[in-house]
Amino acid sequence: MGNFTSLKPRALLRIGMLCGLVYLCGLTSDLEASTKGTSSVITSLERVSGNIADETGTPLPGASVLVKGTTNGTITDLDGNFTLEVESGATLVISYLGYSAKEIQVAEGTNYSIQLEPESAELNEIVVVGYGTQRRADVTGAIGSLKSEDFNRGMISNPVDLLQGKVAGVNITSVSGEPGANQNVIIRGIGSLRSGTQPLYVLDGFLLDNSSTGVASNPLTFLNPNDIESIDVLKDASATALYGSRASNGVIVITTKKGKAGSSQVNLSASTAWSSMAKQIDVFGADEFREQVVAVGGNLEDFGGDTNWQEELTRVGFSQDYSLNFSGANSERFSYFASLGYQDQEGVLKNSNLERYSGKLNVNQKELGGRLVIDYNLTASLTENLRPAIGSITSDMLYLNPTIPALTDGEPTLLNTNNLNPLKRNELYSDEAVNSRILGSISPSFEIIDGLTYKLNLGVDFSNTSRYVQYKPFTEVVNESNVSDGTLDELISANTNSLVENTLTYNWNNYKHNFTVLAGHSYQTFLDEFRGTSYRGFAANNIEPKYQDHNSTSEFPTTVNASAVRNELQSFFGRVNYIYADKYLFTATIRADGSSKFGENNRYGYFPSFALGWNVTKEGFMANSFFDNLKVRTSWGQTGNQEIPSKITKASFSEDRLATGGGSLNTYPIDTEGNTLDDYPYGIVFTRLANPDLQWEVSTQFDIGLDFAFLDYRLTGTIDYFNKVSSNILLEVVPADPVQPTSTYWDNIENMKIYNSGVELALNYSGRPERAFTYEIGGNVTFIQNEVRDSPYSVLTTGAAQGAGQTGATINGYINNQPIGAFYMLQFDGIGEDGLNRFVDINNDGEILDNDRSVVGSAIPTVIYGINSTMRYKGFDLTLNFNGGAGNKIYNHTTMSLFTKAQLSRSNNTTDFAIQFPEESFNNSNTVSTRFLENGAFFRLNNASLGYNLSPERLGAGNAFQNIRLSLTGQNLFVITDYTGFDPEVNTGSTSGGIQTFGIDRFTYPRARTFMLNLNITF
C-alpha cells in the first residue's frame, strides 16, 4: 500500500469513511462490553479533540486515535479531525499506515494539532511479490530488490547483468565475453541435476519460458534494460512457493516503467562505447617462439613473420545505444509509458555483433470510479545476432605459429598444412540468427465490492527465429571438407507461450488488523517448434550458400530434422496474509501444479509454505531503543521442478530392421526361408519405456532472517540463514538389470538429496543527506555450503574433457558427500624420470588407475560478494560497483588442449606452461588432472560511472529541458585473480548427459573492457 496523501479528496473520503465504518462495526461492541458494569470505576472522563496531519500539514483521514492499553478509540474524519472521551491523564497513541506512531499525554482543555512523520522510505518501499505487492515492512519472505537508479551501468544487452554483485545470495556468471552471452544465474545454490540453474523470470506479471528461442545468445536479450523500473529477487520458499513448480531455482520479477502522475515527460538517452580485449593470454612472441622450439628439440617451421594472432583476430568494438521514451498521466484515469530502443553492440572478435530494435508500451486505464482498472503491456523486439566460429577462432589465436605472416600479397596466407587461415575463416563462415519476439498482455481488474477484487491476466509470448550457419566453399583447403565443399544449416524455431490467470483478492483491515486473502487459477501452454535442414556441396561462385539452389545428391544428401513439443501447466493457488498492529506478520501459501510432463499417477504436485514476522521495534519496550527498525522473520516451504524433457513418462517406439554391422537390430522374417535383407520387414522397438509413476522433484527450504536499521535509518541491513534440501531427484539412469528393452530410463533417485545452506549479509550506510557532499556505501556477502548425500552413484559426470584421446574423461560431477560440481581427477605430482606424468597413488596399490581419482575442489564458489558506493557533490556523482568470489576452482581446458610441450615441438605456439618441466617428453599425454586446475577466486571493478547533471536554467533552456546529464562509464576496469585464462568468470564446458556443467574453460570468447559516453535529456 502506498502513501495516501497523494490521493484526491474524493478518494480520501472513501478511504476514511470505509476505515471508519470497519472500525466502528468492530469497536462499538467492544466498547459496550468493556463498559458494562464499570460505571462505578470510571470516575472522570474528558472530551479531547484535535487534528492529525502529515509532515506537510495535509490532513490524514482515517488515522487511528487509541487510548493506550484499552480498546477505546476513534478515527479521524475527512479533514483529519477527531473527538474522543478519555480518562484524565490517559495516553493517546496516534497511528497511520506508512507513518511513525506518536504518543500524546492528555492534558485538560487542550485541543491537539498533531503532525505524523513518515516512516523510513525503505520500510514503505513497495516490493513485488507473487501476484501482488507489499510494503517492505510487511514482507515475511527473503526478497532482494533493486531500483533502476541502483542498477549496474554501461553497455548492457542482458537485463540480468544489472543485478551482478548487487543482491546477496545471487551468483551470476557469464558463459563468455560474447555480446548477449548466456549466463548461469544461481540463487542460493544448485538444487537439481537436470533443470540447470535458471530461475523463473516474471515480466510484468507474465511468466516467461526458459526454453531456447533458437538464438545462441541469452533469451532475455529481447528486453531493453532502459525500460526496466525495478527487479525483485524472490529467494526463500515463502516468497517463491506461490509460483510452485517453476520456482525451485528462485524467481526474478522484472517490472517495467509506467506512467506517473504529473507533467508528461520525454526522455532521450544516447550512448556510444568502445570495447577491447581486457586481457591477452601471454603466448610466445615470434622471436621467443623460435628460441623455445629449438630449445625443446622440436621441428621449427619459420615463415619469417611476426604475427600476434590475438591482435589480428580481435578489434576495438564500437557500440551504440539509443532509447526514447514518453510517459505521463493526463488524469487519474489514464497513464502511459511508451519507448523505442536501438542497440548495436560489436564484440571484440571480428564478425561478432548483436543488434536489437525494441518497442515498449504500457498503458493503465481506470473506469467506473476507479473500480475497473485495466493494464495493457506490449513488448516487441527484433534481434539480429552475428557470431564467428568462436571455438576455432579462439584456439587459432592462441596456438598458431607466430612466424606465419597474417597476409601474403594482401590475402590471408594459405597455411602449408592445408588448414584454414582464421582470417579467411572469418570471410567464409557466418552464423546469423534473426529473432522477432512479441509479448503482449492485458490485465483488467474489477473491485466487486469494497475490498474484493477480481483480476484477469491474459497474455501471449511469441518468438520466431531463423538461423543460418554456413561455410562458403573454399577448395584450397582439403583438411576441412566442410570448408572445401561448403555447408549450410538452416534452423527455424518458433515458440508460443500462452497464459490465462484468474485471481480473487480480498482485503480487510481496521486500526489493528490487516487481512488479505488471495485465490487463483493459472493455465499456461507452451508450444516449441523446430525444423533443421542441413545441406552440403555448393558452387564456389562467391555467393552465400543460403542464396544458392541446392539439390540433394547421393554424395551430399540433404538431411531434415523436425520436432514439435506441446506442454501444459495448470495451477491452483492461494495465499493468506495477516498483520496485527503492524507488529505480528503471518503468511501462508499453497499451490497445486499439474504438468503434462508427468504421468497420470503423479500429475499434480502440492507446494505449501508458511512464514512469520515480528516487527520488534513496534513493541512498547523498544520505544527508547537505538534500533530504528528491527524485524525477525522465518519461513518454511516447498517448491517443485518440472524442467525435464517432454513425454518422458510415455512409451516411445521406432522402426528398425536387420542391418549389417555390430549395431544390427534383429527382426524376424515373415518368410522363414528368407535369406536376404528384403525378407526382413521393419520391426518396432522400444526407444523409451513408459513411467507414469515419475514424481515431482521437490526443494524444501527453511529461512530465518533479521532486518535492522540504526542511526536514523542511515545504517540498514539484513542477515539470513537458509537451508535448502532437494529430494526426489529426477535423472535419466541406466537400468541395473542388463536385460532391458532400452539402455536408459527416467526415474526418481531414491534417498538422494542435494543440500545447500548458507548465510547472507547485506549492509548499506548513507551519509547525512543535508550536506553538500553525500554518499552511500553498501555491500553484501554470501557464504554457502553444498553437498550431495545418499547418492547411489560413484560420480554423475557434469563436465567431461573434449579432444583427441580425451573425449568423455570426467572433469567434475556430483559425488556422494561432496560439494556440487566437485572436480574428480588424478592429483598431478610432477614429471617422472621417464618424462611422463606422475600422479599421486591415493590407495597405495602401486598402480595409477581410475580409483586413484579424488575430489580436489569444487566449481561453485563458497563465498560471493559485492561492494557498491555512490558519492555526490553538487552536480557531480561517482558510482563504483565491485564484485568477487572465492572458494572455487576452474579447470583450464584450453591449457590442457593447447599449451603442451608436444604442441610446441610441432611448431604450434604455447605459453611458458609448456616448458615448466624441461625433462618432460614430447609423448607425454595431457591427462585430466590437477595440473590444469586453477584457483578461481577474483575481485573485479565491475563498473564505475562519473556523471554530471547540467542545470537547464543556467544554460537558458529551463523552459525546454527538465534535466541534462552527461556520464562516462567504464566496465570491467580491472580484475585481481591468479587465474591464467582470459577471465575467471567463465563456463564453456559441454553438458554431459543433459546435466549442466560448471567451472570449465575451453576456448572461451575473451571478455571485453568497455568505456561508454552517455547523454541523457529529459524534456
Image (tube, rainbow, N blue to C red):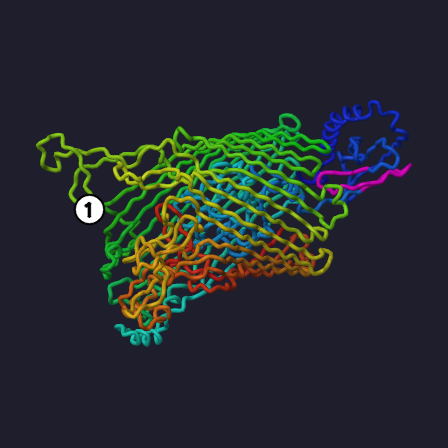
* Residue picked out by circle 1: 553
Compare residues 996 and 909 and report the one nearer the observer.
Answer: 996
Q: Is residue 904 visible?
A: no
> Could you tell me which secondary element the residue under label 1 belongs to?
loop
Q: Position of residue 947 (x, y in %)?
A: 61, 60
Residue at 55% across, 47% down: 227
541 vs 792, left or right, is left
* Magenta region: 92-114
**Quadrant for the N terminus in the image:** top right
Residue 95: in magenta span: yes
Q: Quadrant of residue 727?
A: top left
- Secondary structure mostly taken by the magenta-highlighted segment of the chain: strand
Q: Position of residue 294 (x, y in %)?
A: 29, 76
Compare residues 957 and 825 and report the one nearer the observer.
Answer: 825
Taking 273 as reference, is 574 above or below it? above
Residue at 83% across, 38% down: 91
